Amino acid sequence: MSKETKKPFRQSMAEWRQFIYNPNSGEFLGRTAKSWGLILLFYLVFYGFLAALFTFTMWVMLQTLSSDIPKYRDRISSPGLMISPKPDTALEFYFNRSDSQSYSEYVTTLQNFLESYNDSKQSQNIECTSGKIFDQSEAAVKKACRFNLSELGQCSGKEDANFGYSKGTPCVLVKMNRVIGLKPEGEPHIQCTPKEEGMVNINYFPPNGAMDLKYFPYYGKSLHAHYLQPLVAVQLAITPNGTKEEIAIECKILGSPNLKNQDERDKFLGRIAFKVLMSE
Amino acid sequence: MVKKRSDVYSVEIYGTKDLQKTEIEDEEEKHKDSKGNKKKKKAEDLKKELDLDDHRLNTSELEKKYGTSIDKGLSSARAAEILARDGPNALTPPKATPEIVKFLKQMIGGFSILLWIGAAFSWISFGIQLAQEVDSAFDNLYLGVVLALVVILTGIFAYYQEAKSTNIMASFSKMIPQQALVLRDAEKKELPADQLVVGDIVEIKGGDRIPADIRLISTQGCKVDNSSLTGESEPQSRSCEFTHENPLETRNIAFYSTTCVEGTATGIVINTGDRTIIGRIASLASGVGNEKTPIAIEIEHFVYLVAGVAISIGVLFFIISVSMRYKILDSIIFLIGIIVANVPEGLLATVTVSLSLTAKRMAKKNCLVKNLEAVETLGSTSIICSDKTGTLTQNRMTVAHLWFDNQIYSADTSEDQTTQPFDQSSPSWTALSKIVTLCNRAEFRPGQENLPIMKRVVVGDASETALLKFSEVILGDVMSIRAQNRKVAEIPFNSTNKFQLSIHETDDPHDKRFLLVMKGAPERILERCSTIMINGKEEPLDSEKAEAFQTAYMELGGMGERVLGFCHLYLPENEFPEGFQFDTDSMNFPTSNLCFVGLLSMIDPPRSTVPDAVSKCRSAGIKVIMVTGDHPITAKAIAKSVGIISATSETVEDIAKRLNIPVEQVNRREATAAVVNGMELKDMSSEQLDEILRGHSEIVFARTSPQQKLIIVEGCQRQGAVVAVTGDGVNDSPALKKADIGIAMGIAGSDAAKNAADMVLLDDNFASIVTGVEEGRLIFDNLKKTIAYTLTKNIAELCPFLIYIIASIPMPIGTITILFIDLGTDIIPSVALAYEKAESDIMNRRPRNKRKDRLVNQQLAVYSYLQIGIMQSVGAFVTYFTVYAEQGFLPSTLLGVRVDWESNAIQDFEDSYGQQWTKYQRTYLQWTGYTAFFVSITIQQVADLIIRKTRRNSIFRQGLFRNKVIWVGIFSQIGIALILTYGLGHVTALNFTPLRFQYWFVAVPFAILIWVYDEIRKLLIRRYPGRGTSPCCPSALTNGSEEHHPGRLKNNSEGKELLGPACSEIKFISTRANPDKEQQVLLVPRLFLNSPGEPKVSGLTFASGAREVRADNGAVVNKEVNV
C-alpha cells in the first residue's frame, strides 16, 4: 500500500516544483513573468479604478451633508443618562472611606471632568435666563450658557477636594447625553432612588436635581463649541446601616414628557443604575 | 482493479466451464486479496447451486423431493408454510444504504462539517463568555444554534430530495405486478408471481415471463428466449427430457425472468427469488462498484476549493487578529464570521433542486433518472455504446426492398407508414403481391381494426408478420383476399425444405385453375424455377437473367437484409380440375419448373429519429459505438443507415475491396470506420482494443455477447472517456454498472438491468439519450452560472469582516444577516438560473474534458471573487458609510472605534457632531447598517443574476424576458428583502431594522456598473476568443441567425487568421495546439465541400495547431494544410 502511494507522492512533489517554478518556460506558478505582470497591472488598474470610484462616491455623499448637524437624528430622539466618575467595572463603586487610595481614581476623574467647568474656561459663556429654553436658531454664532460650579455645592470640589468620599458622602455627577436640537419640555430633574430604604440619604445639587432649560437646545460641535451640558450632582450620604452593604441606586430624569426613561431595551435612556459599596 | 474485473467476468454463464474458471481465478486470488473473500464465497455459492440435480430426476422423484403432486399441486397451507420459510419469489433489491446512514451523510457532507465547526466554536465561546459573565454571551449560543439548524435543515432538504427521486424509481418498478397460473389444492389459480413457492406446479404459455426457475414436466412446442440470461438471442426449444449435465444447457429447465416465446409448458418450481440463477447473477453484479459520478467529483472539487478559501482566510485573519492584540475569544468569533461568510450555505440545496428539476424535465422526455447526479453525467458523456435492436431500430422486421422486373425498389420503412410509394403498376407486382399475401400463415389478432396497421399485434413469426403488414398496407384487407383465394393445401416452412408452399383457388370466377405459391430461401426457390416473370410475362430463365438475380440477391444481402424469394405456378386446369385432392405428403403436384416472380428483403429498420440523433451526437463530439449481437453485415448496414458509419467513411475491408489489395496491405490509419466481430474481440488484448478504439472514429461491434460489452466499456474508459451504455439483459448489468452512466431500456429491459442502471429510457429510443445529453450539458452550464452567482456575494459578505478586523469599524454585517442572504434572498434566483436556455452552441461543442473543464475553475472563482465580488463590496460599503454618515458618524470617526463602540460601559459615545449615543442606540444603528449592507448586496445580486444568465453572449441577445423564472427570482429576492426589512424589522433577534427608502438605491449605480463591466467582458471574449474552445459553427447549418456565430475567427487571439470568403462557413472546432491529436483537426461541414477532396474553403490559411481539414463526417479532405 505504502509502496504505491510513495511513488506518486514523489512525482507530485516534482510536479509541484515544476508548477512553482518551471525553468524551461520560465513560468512561475503556471504563468510567465510577463503574464503575471499583466495580471498585476490589470488588478492595479481595476482596483485603482474601484478605489477612485469609492472615494468619489463617498466625496459626493459627504458633499450632501452639512457640517453642523447630521442629516437624520431619528436614531437618538431621546438622550441617555451617564454618570461621572465611571467605575471600570460595570458601574459599581467600591471604596473604603478611610483609604484614600481606594477612591483616588474617582476623585481624579471628577476633578478632570469638572476642569472644563472652571470659571476660567467659561469666560466666553454668557449668563442665560433660567427656566427658559435658550433658542438661538436665528443667531449665526451660538452662545453657550454658563454653568457655575458653585451650583454643585458640596460636590463642586471647591469645598471638599475629595468630593465627600472620605466622609462617607460620595458625590456622583449625573449628566444627560448631548443630543442636537433637543428641547426638553416641562421641568426636567434628576431623581435617584435607592433600591432599599434607610441605607442612604440623597442630596441633589442644584436643589431637586433640576436641569435648567436654559442649557437647551444643543447646536452641535461646530456651531456650539463652548457648550457645556448641565450637571446634577448626587450626594449619597451613606448611613451606618448602609455601610458595608451594596446599595443599588437608580437615577431617572423626571418631569419632562419628551424625555423617555422607561425604554425596555435601552436601559440607559433617561435613566441609569449603579451600585455603591462603601467600607470603613 | 484486477480483482474487480475477474468478479465481473464470473457473471458470464456459458456453462460450468466458465464458472469453474472463475472458481480457479478466485482460488488464486485468495492469496492475493483477502478482501475478496465475500465475493469469492458468492461465486462458490453459485457453483454449488448449479450442481442442482433436478434436471436428472424423473417426475416421481421430483414430486417426492418437493412434497408436491403434479395433479393437485401444493395445498394452500403447505404453500403458505414454504412461503413463510423462503420468503416471496422476488429479487431482493440491491441492498440499500440504511436511511439513517443516508441522512447522516447529508449532515456531515459538503460544507456541513465547516458549519458544525462554526457552531462548535460558537458554543465554546458562549461557554467561556458565560463563565466570564459577559452580557452578550447568549448571542453566541443563538448563533451556534442557528448554524446547527442551517446544517440540519439543508441536510433534511437534501435527504428529502434524494428520497423523492428514489421513490420515482421505486414506483416505476412496481408498475406491473406479474401473474402466474398455479395449480394449488387441485385448482388452477392466478396468483401474483411473488407468491410462488418451491414445489408449485405452474403453467406457462407463449408470451409469458417465466415466474421462477422451473423444471418442466410437460411441454407442447415450447420455446424460450434466454437472451436475458445468456445473451443468445435465438429462441431455444424446451422439453421434458434431460439433455445435458449442465443445468444451464439442459432442455428441461426454464429460468426465472426469461420469456416463453411460443408453446405451452407445465413445470415444478425448483427455485424462487434470490435463489434462482438470475437472482444469483443479479446479486453478484451488484458487487461491481459504482464509480463516483462526474458531477459528484465536481461538487467535491468545488467544496474543497471554497472550504480551502474559507479556512485559509479564516486562519490568516485569526493570526492577524491575534497579532493585532485582539482577545483569542474575539478572534474565534471573527473566525466563525469568516467561515459563515465564505460558505455558500444554500448552494448545495440549490444544486440538488436544479438537478431534480432537470431530472423531472428529462422524465417528461422519457429519460427516467434514478440517481440525480446522473443527470449531468449524461451531459459529459463522450462515448455512447448503444444496443442496436430496439434502441437504434424499431425492433420489428419490415420489408425494406423488393426486386422484380430486374429492378430493385425501396419500400418505406418508417414507423407509421400508411402507403408505399414505389411503382406498383407492373403486372409482376400484382403477381408478387398475390404470393406475398397468400403464402403467409401470419394473422392479425382480431379486434384491432381501429389501430394503425403497424401497431397491430400479429400471430406469426417476424418475417411473416412483416410480409402481412406490408401487404395489408398496400392491398388493404388481406384476410378477405385470403378468404377469396381459398387455401386448399399447404406445406409449412421447415428447415430441410427451406420453403413454404400453399395452393389456392383463384378469386377469378372464370379461372378455374389452382394457384401454387411458394416462398423461401432465394437460391432454393430459384432452383425450382425455369421461368422468370418480367413485366407480367413469363420469360425463360437464362443465365443472363440468373446473373441479374444473383446480383440483386447479393446486393440486398449485402445491405444486411433477410431476403426471401417468391415464385408461383398456375396449375394446368386439365391435370388439376376443380376439387382435386392435393396431398402434401406425397406431393402430387409440381414443385419445380415454377415461375420466379421476385425477391423481398426485410430488415429491422432504424427508428426514424435515430439518424438525426446520431448526427447530433456527432456534432456534439460524442462517439457512438454500436454493440450488437447481430451479424456484422446487418450491423454495418444499420450503422450506415443511421449514420454511425457515415456515408463516405470506409473500413479496412472496404478500402481493400476498393483498391483491390489484401486487407493486410491497407494502411489502417486511413480507415475511419471499423466493424469488429465478437470472435475477434475475444482474442484481442486490451492494447489491441485500445488501438481500435483510438484509431477509428466509427466503430461497430457485431456478434458480441452482452459480457463483451463490459470489455468494450472498460476499453472506452481507459481512453478517459465518459461512457454511456445501453442495455436490457441481466447480463448487461455489470456493463451498466461499470459504465459512467448505465441506461436500461424501459420496455425491453429486465429488472436486473434497470436496477443496475442509472437511467431508464422509457421509450427505448436512442433519440431520447440525445435529449438527455442536451439537458445534461445545459444543467452543467447552468450550475456553473448558479455557482458563479452564489460565490460572488461571498466576497461582499467576507469583506466586512476583514475590514472590521483591520480597520476596527463597527460591524458592517451580522452573521445572521449573512445567513438570510445565503438561505433567503439568494435561493430562488440561483434555482432560476437552472431554467436558463442554452447559449446557442450547446450541442455543437465537444463533451467537456473531465480533467480540464471543471465546474468551478480558476477563471470562474477569480472573476467572481476578485472582480464582481469586490465591486459588490464597494457598493455595499458605500451604502454602509452613507447610513452612518447621515446619522452623524462620518467615515473618519468610524475608523478604529470598534472597542469603544462595542463597550457596554460607554453609554455616551460621541459622534462627529458632538452628540452622545447610548450602547443600545449604537447597536440599533449598527443593525440599520446591517440592513443597509444586506439591501445593497441584494440589489447588486439582481445585477449579478442578470449577468450570469449568459457566459459569452450579450444579455440583449439572450433576451431578458425569455426566462420568466429569472424574474420570479428577482421579485422574490426583492420581496424577501422588503419583508425582512419592513415586516420583520422590529424583531430584534433578526437584527433587521426598517430602512429609509433611499438607501435601497445607493448601490444601484454599482449594480449598473457590474452589468456594464460584464457586458464589456463578454464583448471582449466574443471579439478575442483566445485560447479557450471557441466553436464557430456555420450559420447555414443551423437556423442562420447571428446567434450561432459566437467566435469570429478572423480575430483569433493567437494572431492566426482564417482568410478567404468562405470563412464564415467553416465549422471551427478548436485551434488550440493540444497534445490530443483529435483536436488538431479542423472540421469542415460536408455541406460546404463542393466535391470530395475539395473544400470550398480554398483560400484557407491558418497557423494554429490544426494540421488537417476534415469534413464533419470524418473524411479527410486535406491533410497538412499550410500551417
Image (spheres, helix red, strand yellow):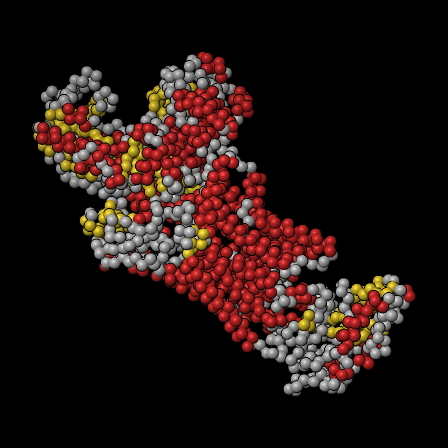
Q: Is residue B772 visible?
A: no
Q: Examine the rendered structure and indicate whether residue B272 appears above or below residue B740.
A: above
Tell whether B721 sits left or right of B431: right
Q: How many marks?
A: 0
User: Which of these two is toward me, B258 or A111?
Assistant: A111
Q: Residue B579: where, in percent of width, then height?
A: 17, 21
Q: Examine the rendered structure and indicate whether residue A129 appears above or below residue B162.
A: below
Q: Is residue B287 visible?
A: yes
| Residue at (76, 65) in percent of width and height | A88
Q: Quadrant of residue B670?
A: top left
User: Which of these two is toward me, B735 or A172?
Assistant: A172
Q: Residue B783: where, in percent of width, then height?
A: 45, 52
User: Which of these two is toward me, B846 or A23?
Assistant: A23
Q: Residue A64: where, in percent of width, then height?
A: 55, 77
| Residue at (62, 53) in percent of width and height | B146
Residue found farthest to the front? A23
Q: Examine the rendered structure and indicate whether residue A204 appears above or below residue B1113.
A: below
Tell whether B910 sits left or right of B115: right
Tell whether B1000 sits left or right of B571: right
Q: Quadrant of the N terminus of chain B?
A: top left
| Residue at (13, 27) in percent of width and height | B595
| Residue at (72, 58) in percent of width and height | B134
Q: Residue B896: where, in percent of width, then height?
A: 63, 67
